[in-house]
Image: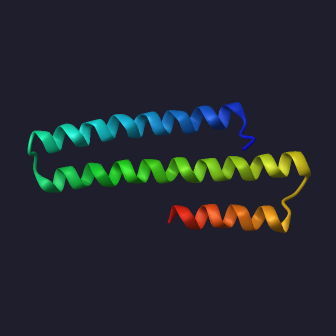
Protein backbone atom coordinates (compact mmCIF):
# COMPACT_ATOMS: atom_id res chain seq x y z
CA UNK A 1 0.00 0.00 0.00
CA UNK A 2 1.53 3.28 -1.13
CA UNK A 3 -0.28 5.90 0.91
CA UNK A 4 1.05 9.45 1.00
CA UNK A 5 2.46 10.63 4.31
CA UNK A 6 -0.27 13.25 4.77
CA UNK A 7 -3.01 10.67 4.10
CA UNK A 8 -1.37 8.20 6.47
CA UNK A 9 -1.06 10.84 9.19
CA UNK A 10 -4.75 11.72 8.86
CA UNK A 11 -5.77 8.05 9.11
CA UNK A 12 -3.47 7.44 12.08
CA UNK A 13 -5.05 10.42 13.83
CA UNK A 14 -8.55 9.06 13.14
CA UNK A 15 -7.63 5.65 14.53
CA UNK A 16 -5.99 7.16 17.61
CA UNK A 17 -9.14 9.21 18.22
CA UNK A 18 -11.23 6.04 17.88
CA UNK A 19 -8.87 4.29 20.28
CA UNK A 20 -9.53 7.00 22.86
CA UNK A 21 -13.27 6.71 22.29
CA UNK A 22 -13.07 2.94 22.72
CA UNK A 23 -11.24 3.36 26.03
CA UNK A 24 -14.11 5.64 27.06
CA UNK A 25 -16.63 2.95 26.10
CA UNK A 26 -14.80 0.44 28.26
CA UNK A 27 -14.88 2.84 31.22
CA UNK A 28 -18.58 3.44 30.68
CA UNK A 29 -19.29 -0.29 30.72
CA UNK A 30 -17.18 -0.78 33.85
CA UNK A 31 -19.03 2.10 35.52
CA UNK A 32 -22.35 0.51 34.49
CA UNK A 33 -23.44 3.63 32.66
CA UNK A 34 -26.76 3.91 30.86
CA UNK A 35 -27.02 1.44 27.99
CA UNK A 36 -28.16 4.03 25.45
CA UNK A 37 -25.12 6.20 26.24
CA UNK A 38 -22.78 3.23 25.87
CA UNK A 39 -24.36 2.21 22.57
CA UNK A 40 -24.11 5.79 21.29
CA UNK A 41 -20.38 5.75 21.99
CA UNK A 42 -19.95 2.32 20.39
CA UNK A 43 -21.69 3.67 17.29
CA UNK A 44 -19.32 6.67 17.30
CA UNK A 45 -16.25 4.41 17.52
CA UNK A 46 -17.56 2.20 14.74
CA UNK A 47 -18.25 5.21 12.55
CA UNK A 48 -14.78 6.63 13.21
CA UNK A 49 -13.16 3.36 12.18
CA UNK A 50 -15.35 3.16 9.06
CA UNK A 51 -14.23 6.66 8.08
CA UNK A 52 -10.60 5.67 8.62
CA UNK A 53 -11.09 2.64 6.37
CA UNK A 54 -12.72 4.71 3.64
CA UNK A 55 -9.93 7.28 3.93
CA UNK A 56 -7.36 4.51 3.39
CA UNK A 57 -9.18 3.25 0.30
CA UNK A 58 -9.46 6.80 -1.07
CA UNK A 59 -5.74 7.36 -0.46
CA UNK A 60 -4.91 4.13 -2.26
CA UNK A 61 -7.13 5.18 -5.15
CA UNK A 62 -5.41 8.58 -5.36
CA UNK A 63 -2.03 6.90 -5.23
CA UNK A 64 -2.98 4.53 -8.06
CA UNK A 65 -4.11 7.44 -10.22
CA UNK A 66 -1.03 9.54 -9.41
CA UNK A 67 1.45 6.75 -10.19
CA UNK A 68 -0.21 5.10 -13.16
CA UNK A 69 -2.24 7.97 -14.59
CA UNK A 70 -5.39 5.93 -14.15
CA UNK A 71 -6.88 2.92 -12.43
CA UNK A 72 -6.83 -0.45 -14.14
CA UNK A 73 -9.84 -2.73 -14.08
CA UNK A 74 -7.98 -5.03 -11.68
CA UNK A 75 -7.17 -2.15 -9.32
CA UNK A 76 -10.77 -0.94 -9.51
CA UNK A 77 -12.07 -4.42 -8.63
CA UNK A 78 -9.63 -4.62 -5.72
CA UNK A 79 -10.67 -1.20 -4.39
CA UNK A 80 -14.33 -2.08 -4.84
CA UNK A 81 -13.87 -5.23 -2.75
CA UNK A 82 -12.16 -3.19 -0.05
CA UNK A 83 -15.03 -0.69 0.07
CA UNK A 84 -17.66 -3.43 0.11
CA UNK A 85 -15.77 -5.14 2.91
CA UNK A 86 -16.15 -2.00 5.02
CA UNK A 87 -19.93 -2.05 4.81
Screen quadrant of the N terminus: top right
- Position of residue 77 relative to residue 49, above or below, is below
* 62 on left or right of 57: right
Question: Which one is in front, 40 or 56?
Answer: 56
* 81 on left or right of 11: right
* 35 on left or right of 85: left
Residue at 19% in and 37% down = 27
Residue at 85% in and 46% down = 66
Question: Residue pushed farthest right?
Answer: 69
Residue 45 is situated, as x and y percent measured from the top left of the image, at: 36, 48
Residue at 60% in and 31% down = 9
Q: Picture quarter containing residue 80? A: bottom right
- Position of residue 33 relative to residue 20, above or below, is below
Q: Picture quarter containing residue 4? A: top right
- Position of residue 39 relative to residue 74, above or below, is above
Residue 42 is situated, as x and y percent measured from the top left of the image, at: 29, 51
Amino acid sequence: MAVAVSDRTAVVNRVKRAQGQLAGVLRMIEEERDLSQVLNQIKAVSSALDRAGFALVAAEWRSSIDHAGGVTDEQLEHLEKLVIGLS
